[in-house]
Amino acid sequence: MRRLRPVAYAVAAILGVALLVLAVDTLVVWREVAADDFRFQAAPSRQRALWEDIGVLPSSLTASALGIEDDLAYRRTTSLFTRAKPGRAPYPGPALAALRGQATLQLTRTSQAETDARRHSQLLNFLGTLPLDRRIQDPAERASVLQTAIGTFQSAVRIDPDNADAKTNLELVLRISNFAAFPANQPSAERGGGKRSGSGSTGGGY
């Protein structure tokens, strides 16, 4: 037993040092997460490599120990979505188009792995939004994009019924889809007023 005591002391000392390093790294991780949160809020579309390589330990072991890997993945994906400039560049250049493709892939992966209902719903809302500002000339392709967006927004609302953004986007896409379903020269397309076929009178809209 006496021979084992030095070994036990050595193991205890090593564990003590490891716990001390982990405690220090925990403080560093939270400080760096808060700093990157501030940077993102200050200029969301201009930030890169946020919430990466945080902490002192390799491969962010502290983040794994703290169980915040999902939180960091959500933050990184949201940042990438913002940098893709949804709704602000209908004719993106090659670099932005590639970034949007990357954002679509990461949104898909992160949303599939997300267990928090609120974050899962918001990721789906982002995913449904990205392709909608493309100027698509082909009617069949446009209809396919709209139907995919409708399904994505419906899933977002189903997962989190309190997601007001997803509800608004779903309503808008449904309106666009219904309007696009009618050729412009057919009476049913005249939703804002005008003569209805065979009525001989000016309608007030539906």
Image (cartoon, rainbow, N blue to C red):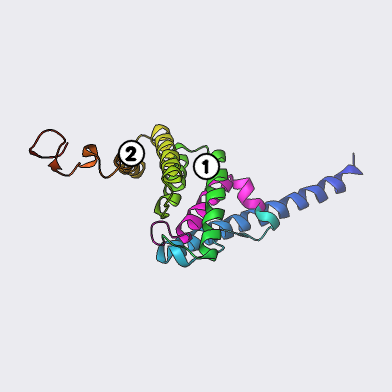
Q: Which residue is disc 2 drawn over? A: 181
Stretch in magenta = 61-89
Give the secondary structure at mark 1: helix
Magenta stretch, overall SS: helix
Point out residue 13 in the picture as x, y percentages from the top left corner. Answer: 77, 52
List the single residue furthest toward the right.
Answer: 3
Q: CA distance from mark 1 to mark 2?
A: 30 Å
Left or right, residue 144 beside residue 16: left
| Residue 20 is inside the magenta segment | no
Q: Which residue is disc 1 drawn over? A: 111
Work out which quarter of the rendered image holds the N terminus and state it: top right
Q: Residue 71 versus residue 12: which sits nearer the camera? A: 71
List the single residue furthest toward the left.
Answer: 201
Mark 1 or mark 2: which is in front? Answer: 2
Q: Residue at x 44, y 45 (%)?
A: 128
Please give the label number shown on residue 98: none
Point out residue 9 in the picture as x, y percentages from the top left corner. Answer: 81, 49
Left or right, residue 39 beside residue 55: left
Give the secondary structure at mark 2: loop
Residue 55, by quadrant, is bottom right
Q: Closer to the N terminus: mark 1 or mark 2?
A: 1
Residue kind at label 2, given as amino acid type:
Ala
Residue 69 vs 157, above or below: the answer is below
Residue kind at label 1, given as amino acid type:
Ser
Residue 199 vs 39, above or below: the answer is above
Q: Residues within 10 Å of mark 1 (few under 14, many from 20)?
A: many
